[in-house]
Image (tube, grey):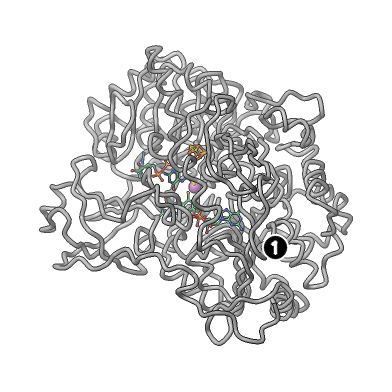
Amino acid sequence: MSRTVRTTCPYCAVQCNFDLHLEAGQAVRITPTRECPVAGGTVCKKGLSALSDLRHPDRLTTPLLRRDGKLREVSWETALSAFAAQVGPLLDTDPTQLGVFGSGALTNEKTYLLGKLARVGFGTPNIDYNGRFCMSSAATAMNRSFGLDRGLGFPLADVAKADLIVLFGANIAETLPPVMQFLKAAKDRGATIVNIDPRSTPGLSQLHLNLYPGTDHLLAGLLLKLMGEWGRLRPSAPAEGQREVLDSVAHLTPEQVAAACGLDVDDVLKLAQLYAQAHHPLILSGRGPEQQTNGTDTVSALINLAFLSGHFGKPGGGYGTLTGQGNGQGGREHGQKNDQLPGYRHLNSPADRAHMAAFWGVPESALPGVGKSAQDLLLSCGDDIRALVVIGTNPAISAPGAPLIRERLAALDFLVVIDVLPSETALMADLVLPGSMWAEEEGTTTNLEGRVQRRRRAMTVPGLAREDWRILCDLAHAVGRGEKFRYADFPSLQQEFFAATAGGKADYSGLSAERLDSGTFQWPISHAQHPGTPHPYFAPYATASGRAQLHPVRMSVPERPALTLTTGRVAGQYQSGTQSRRNPALKGTPDVQMHPETARQYGISQGQAVHLAGPHGETVLPAQLTPKIRPGVAFIAFHWPGSANELTSAHALDPHSYMPAFKSGAVRASVQPVLPAHSPPLRSFSALNPLPVPGDSR
Ligand SMILES: Nc1nc2c(c(=O)[nH]1)N[C@H]1C(S)=C(S)[C@@H](COP(=O)(O)OP(=O)(O)OC[C@H]3O[C@@H](n4cnc5c(=O)[nH]c(N)nc54)[C@H](O)[C@@H]3O)O[C@H]1N2
Ligand SMILES: Nc1nc2c(c(=O)[nH]1)N[C@H]1C(S)=C(S)[C@@H](COP(=O)(O)OP(=O)(O)OC[C@H]3O[C@@H](n4cnc5c(=O)[nH]c(N)nc54)[C@H](O)[C@@H]3O)O[C@H]1N2
Ligand code: SF4
Ligand SMILES: [Mo]
């Protein structure tokens, strides 16, 4: 029998919809649909080939427990008893010693349940998630200015209304391909597109400013100063901090800023003129300016520019950040962040605490306070964190300073990983629990425009795998704390989740599975007739005074090491690569991109092995020489073992968002004569692990 199920893509934050076709219960094909409310039927090659994951031979289908140094297949009973034996005593003595590490790849319902499990079930404050490494700088800056963080405060269709689009460190053509259609529509209507990136990335831009990494704040500051000089300031709404912001940029000159950014002064002035002349300029940021030790301040500088020149919050103009992970937006709203309660409530707010404690039926004093943020949590492993539960993320590859992080993970008494494939982190674990992936579960995700969409179950989990939400409940029950984790079925969890958000900033309480079956809605959506909120940023804002709070930014000039490393993505791979490296339709091998001029200085030739060293580790990669990167900068994508995060710093963090400095760091390079096997072939789980121990209860 054949069936077709309309669902959402498992990968990035565009959350394209497509049709999954099944024959006799097996997924056989994915086809795009013009009815996709986000991208109208344009799907990228990752989405089109997403079937690769579903029944991959490496798919985890049974719990695995480490015994005598090896992961061995065990029954759920054995797995959960091991969890109880290791984690139960910790919870009885000091629950703060248990950490929980979540993910923006999880549906909203799982995000909600994970936060509730950590705080109400386990009683630990120490929960955070991989979105800390992704959206935290932009989220922190938006929150501190407007009390609200929705990455795009407008539907993607608004992008087509802009007459100037300035991309700050966003490689849209490679990372969010369907979004290109909105840039193209704007360009077809006469818009100018400017790309600000140390690399010349593919796209539609007419002007490219290849600035030195970490200098975007200076450029934004100068633009603001010039808008003032040229009489272009008209604040979007009443604001506090305007005078301080303008004072902080008063000393900047085009010549100084061009020199600090490594740009041509004429190009800088050309950008300023374009911005001054545009009626609907739109600034979009990606991870380039955000994953920096001054990432939050840099986003504030972009907000200050858009806001004070009168464009913020207007259709077709202003500022927006492009969220990355499939549920990167919803994942930062409902309680897996160290300081957060569902509905974007805050753990430090007495009213929010009281509300959620009453909702959950626990005393307010039972809710822990703010816990460790992601990198602090990872670095504390083996010290005051003794056991860690990881779900939906692979920090052994994706965390900054990965060699040090792997050391910390290895120092834990007990590492539990809930995944669908044997990621590098799962292979380090003491207990691996096989969870569920996209087509195997119901739920909702919230895309980069704040659009909540339904993910539909098309098939059941294979073998002994279990749906993630059931596993989370099982963990609570295993340690005798299951009272609040008795859900008859998924709809009862989902209804509880929607209800938990009522009255919060990210209010989803007007949603139901039925409403989402026929439509999609941008939050907030506070009652069953609410049509959703395409434009949430209007005055009075969700700040204490109702006015925007603008933040002056220190216009410091970063140091310039001999060779600066910046890192990021390529079109053909996804994230830590657990999924994409196993997908035969997606290609690519790691390398280090450098300008031929830089290569000459180091005596490096095309394809030659380059030895690179960072603060915690080293690696060897083939040189990819390209004039498309600025001299003095090297670029490495992070999708493979032995790639970018062998070289990034585990300690360089933004003081406001605790975002790592993935985009600027010093590397040392030397030349090696031979090209070693830099990308170890993927090892399947069965090759690494023997058959189950005879006599193991199954
Ligand atoms: N193919 C693919 N698509 C993806 C993903 C993936 O892994 N693969 N991941 C998804 C996720 S989670 C995310 S967060 C998004 C990220 O999407 P993007 O933000 O577009 O991706 P990055 O490659 O991390 O960074 C973007 C650009 O920033 C530039 N850059 C580096 N340093 C600086 C700087 O100091 N200033 C400026 N202005 N630019 C700089 C880099 O050269 C790079 O081209 O992509 C999503 N989509
Ligand atoms: N150097 C450098 N490092 C970076 C970045 C960079 O630009 N440069 N970018 C950072 C950013 S923006 C991000 S978002 C992170 C991403 O880094 P990670 O979060 O480590 O990346 P993923 O590969 O998406 O990890 C997802 C894991 O969860 C599993 N998984 C996926 N869906 C599910 C699910 O529904 N249930 C369960 N149980 N498991 C699931 C996958 O198999 C995979 O093992 O990396 C960060 N690291
Ligand atoms: S753009 Fe993102 S959501 Fe759309 S198909 Fe590609 S990976 Fe999936
Ligand atoms: Mo991300």
Q: Establish if 24 lies above or below 424.
A: above
Q: Is residue 122 visible?
A: no
Q: Is residue 303 left or right of residue 122?
A: left
Q: Residue at x 64, y 53 (%)?
A: 337
Identity of the amino acid at label 1? Pro
Please provide percent x and percent y for residue 502: 80, 38
Q: Is residue 623 visible?
A: yes
Q: Establish if 147 lies above or below 101.
A: above
- Quadrant containing the N terminus is top right
Displayed quadrant of residue 499: top right
Q: Which residue is mark 1?
A: 125
- Quadrant containing the C terminus is bottom right
Q: Is mark 1 within 8 Å of ligand 2?
A: no
Please provide percent x and percent y for residue 690: 51, 80
Displayed quadrant of residue 453: top right
Q: Residue at x 63, y 47 (%)?
A: 24
Please provide percent x and percent y for residue 91: 75, 74
